[in-house]
Image (tube, rainbow, N blue to C red):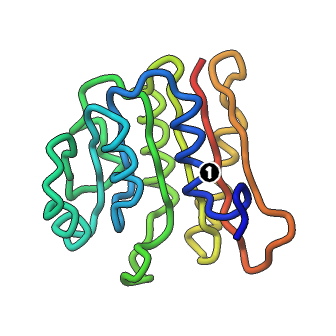
Amino acid sequence: MYKYVGDISVLAHYIIKEFLENKLVAIDGTLGNGYDTDFLSEHFNKVYAFDIQKSACENYIMKEKSNVSVINDSHHLLNEYVKEEVNCIIYNLGFLPGGDKNITTEHNTSLESIKKGLKLLSSGGIIAISIYTGHNEGKKEETCILEYLQRLPKSKYGVMVHSYLNRTNNPPKLVIVEKK
C-alpha cells in the first residue's frame, strides 16, 4: 500500500487538515457513504452535506452528528441552503460506491456548484474535487471543470491537479483550488 499515491480522498483530507487555517464551516457536496463528511465533522464546527439520493442521506442521519446538516438535494443548489462563508468544500464526483451506477453527478450541475462554491469560499479557503472518469459523465465533468478552473485568475486562486501517470482504466484526479 502506498502512503502518498494511494487513495486520493486521503490526500485531499491531508491537504485540508495541514494547509487550511480556519476550520469553521465546510460543505460536502457529495455525501455518498459519508467518509468525507465524517472527516469534515471531526475538524470543522459546522458541516453541510448534500446528496440527491435519499438513501445516502437517511443512512448518514442515523449517525446523529450534531454539527452536520444533511441536505437531500443537489449540490448545485448549495447557495439556497448555505448563507454563510465557508472555509472548505469537498466534492467526490461520480456515483455512490455500492449504489446505482446509473445515478451519477452531472457535469452541468457539478460545474454550477463549483462556481457557486467559489463565491461562498473564504479567503484562504480550499475546494477539493475528486474527479472519476471511468464513466461517460465523468469524462464530461473532467473536461468542463478543468477548462473552467484553468481560466480562474491566478491573482485570486491557485489551482493544482494531482493525477496518476502509471495507472490504467481512467484513474481519478484530485483538483485543489485555494482562494487567496
Q: Quadrant of the N terminus?
A: bottom right
The residue under the point 18% across, 50% down is 65
The residue under the point 26% across, 35% down is 46
Residue 133: x and y in percent read 64, 69
Q: Nearer the viewer, residue 16 or 148?
A: 16
The amino acid pointed to by label 1 is: Leu
The residue beneath circle 1 is 11
Q: Is residue 37 above or below residue 117?
A: below
Query: In the shown orientation, is residue 29 left or right of residue 111?
Result: left
The quadrant in which residue 173 appears is bottom right
Residue 73: x and y in percent read 24, 56
Q: Nearer the viewer, residue 4 or 125?
A: 4
Query: In the shown orientation, is residue 132 left or right of residue 59?
Result: right
The residue under the point 60% across, 67% down is 132
Residue 149: x and y in percent read 65, 39
Query: In the shown orientation, is residue 57 left or right of residue 158?
Result: left
Q: Is residue 82 above or below residue 163?
A: above
